[in-house]
Amino acid sequence: MDKRNRIQEHHVLEIGESEEITFYWNRKPLKAKRGEVIASALIANGIYIFGYHPHDNTPQGMFCANGQCAKCGVIANGIPVKSCMVKVQENMIVESMNGLPELPLKEEPVSIEDIEEQKTDILIIGGGPAGLSAAIELARYDYNIVLIDDKSELGGKLVLQTHKFFGSVEDSYAGTRGIDIGKMLSDKLREYPNCSIWLNSTALFVFKDKKVGILQDESYRIVEPKVILNAAGAREKFLRFPGNTLPGIYGAGAFQTLVNRDLVRPSRRLFIVGGGNVGLIAGYHALQAGITVVGLVEAMPRCGGYKVHSDKLKRLGVPIYTRHTVLSAQGSDGVESVTIAEIDENFQPIAGTEKTFLCDTILIAVGLEPLSEFTQEAETAGIEVYSAGDSNEIAEASSAMFNGRIIGLKVAKALGAPVEDIPHEWYAKAENLKQEPGKIYEQEFPEKREGVFPVIHCLQEIPCNPCTTVCPHKSIELNGDPLMGLPRFTGECSGCHRCLTICPGLAITLVDYRQNREKPIVTLPYEVSNYPVEKGDRVRAVDIDGNFLAELPVVNILKHRNSKTDLIKLEAPPEIAARIVSFRVQDDEVTKPLPEPVISEKTSDDAMVCLCERVKVGEVRELIRNGLTDINQIKAITRLGMGPCGSKTCDTLIRQIFREEGISADEIVPNTKRPVFIEVPLKSFVDSGRKGK
């Protein structure tokens, strides 16, 4: 097996041996890991182009890895499939999709059977943090529950999160890594026999006869629930810029799926668009996978994600360009470079500020859109429906879990369960957990130069409290709000390191003067072992903003197996000891722009708004300027939204164009969405070889 694109070492994830199988790509035999999806197997073998679009013969790659778009389509054993959702099989024949294949002529008799139907009290769509948390609360009562998820394991985006979570230790497992939380929740739910779990199962539509069509593996089934809980999550938003169709442009979730779930390294040089928590965290995950992060661009004056996340990137050597936007991506068969520019107060590029960076991958993290279709369909059908997690409101996973518990209890109470009134404190805590990052404060450094003490580099109001729970002396407390306040060290310290290893932001260091008051030891948390550090090395120590302080020796390294956070001990001058937060791992050279920027001849109107049908922004803009405000009419003229993704990607983009043209939302006639949610082979509706649950 070609191991160049396989992650061989990771600080958090276990790298085990997997059985190899053979499959064929365009008649060439390749090796894959049993159980991985086709897309991951192809990228692991260095194949990034999955086909060529029949409209313009441009190369196609993968974007979402979540079955929401259609960029990763291939032909598998003669059938068009989304390669991110279908597992590779022994001797599977996979071919490029350059348009639809010829349909095989078969004269085999077709056996049509009755579709299996099942009634249940509650249907939960989505087994992520919100769906799992709600299901656990509901399963405590004597209701029949069916929980479906379109992946092969429960957990949703939790299975992609190698970092420790923020929030409350008591209510949302703060200080625990997302991958571990997902396993804990799924293990807990499996203790309840009244909850049936259907994996590899996708809700197709909620019909007006109050039944839900579900594709389970390759079989079509119908569930008739009394109540639906939509916890299907969200889909990633796309971005309009020339070159946005090139292979090598990924959504953050797709990138994390490859790196953290499938242990596939899809990139050598990554550039990130979007400074929310998703983009910032994905950048950190890239570093953990040994990928160079060339830079991150954010349109706002400062990143919208937590400051501790952006601080982590900056001090490891990743430049962050605020008040900048992407102008274009360059490349022939894939991304080769990206050009950005500074923007003015009207978000327009400023001429002369362009910068071009060499990269092979652009990660798009510009927001999420609630997957609310099933809620709307259920309301139309007259089924009692609830929403939880990102399907209801975009927020952090810690918020999704706690709000999922509340929604679960609400559903149970609506069905008549003996549920006590939900305490007012729960609602207050739920509001705190989904709050945007708050005020940023100036850092105050301790003046003392004796003993041992932690230095807390967390300067922004965010919902997080794990450091206050682990100190054996109760010497760390939150100043103000019990969840949103800033942590403060107020008592004695024995140098136990617990606060360092639990802090999700890696924002606590330890300064120790006990051995030598002239050369204190500074202890730093470290989780990026793809950039190895050994005792005796000299590292470039930096402050909270990534500013270089001094080159210092590593005098010791403590390996913490339980927390998987190493502690690096540096010998430092006392005048800078409290200011040291980390050390740079990336060389400055790898993040420098080219001497001269690459200015694309294409304009923003040349960007694609519909990737499936290759409809350009300018085509849509012209129709709007000619008076069209009905998206269905625009669809009929241009085919926008008629591709296999079913307008999941372009619907948001076309609304952006309407806003730019001064058309308000209430003037727009929305696109009429029709069944089904994803493409379904016709044989799934008639095939007699049903697999059952």
Image (tube, rainbow, N blue to C red):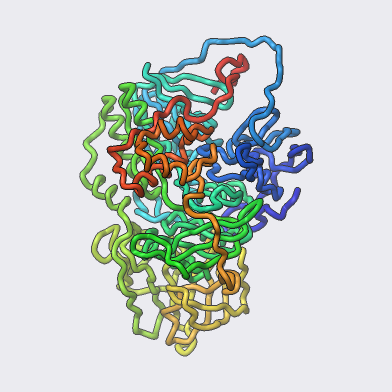
- Tell me residue 89's x, y (percent): 70, 34
- Tell me residue 296's x, y (percent): 49, 62
- Identified at 38% across, 35% down, the residue is 372
The single residue placed furthest to the right in the displayed view is 28
186 to 692, vertically: above or below: below
- Identified at 39% across, 34% down, the residue is 631
209 to 645, vertically: above or below: above
Does 635 sit left or right of 458 as displayed? Answer: right
Q: Is residue 392 visible?
A: yes
* Nearest to the observer: residue 100 or residue 300: 100
241 to 489, vertically: above or below: above
- Tell me residue 108's x, y (percent): 70, 12
643 to 382, vertically: above or below: below
The single residue placed furthest to the bottom in the displayed view is 518
Quadrant for the C terminus, please.
top right
- Tell me residue 320's x, y (percent): 46, 67
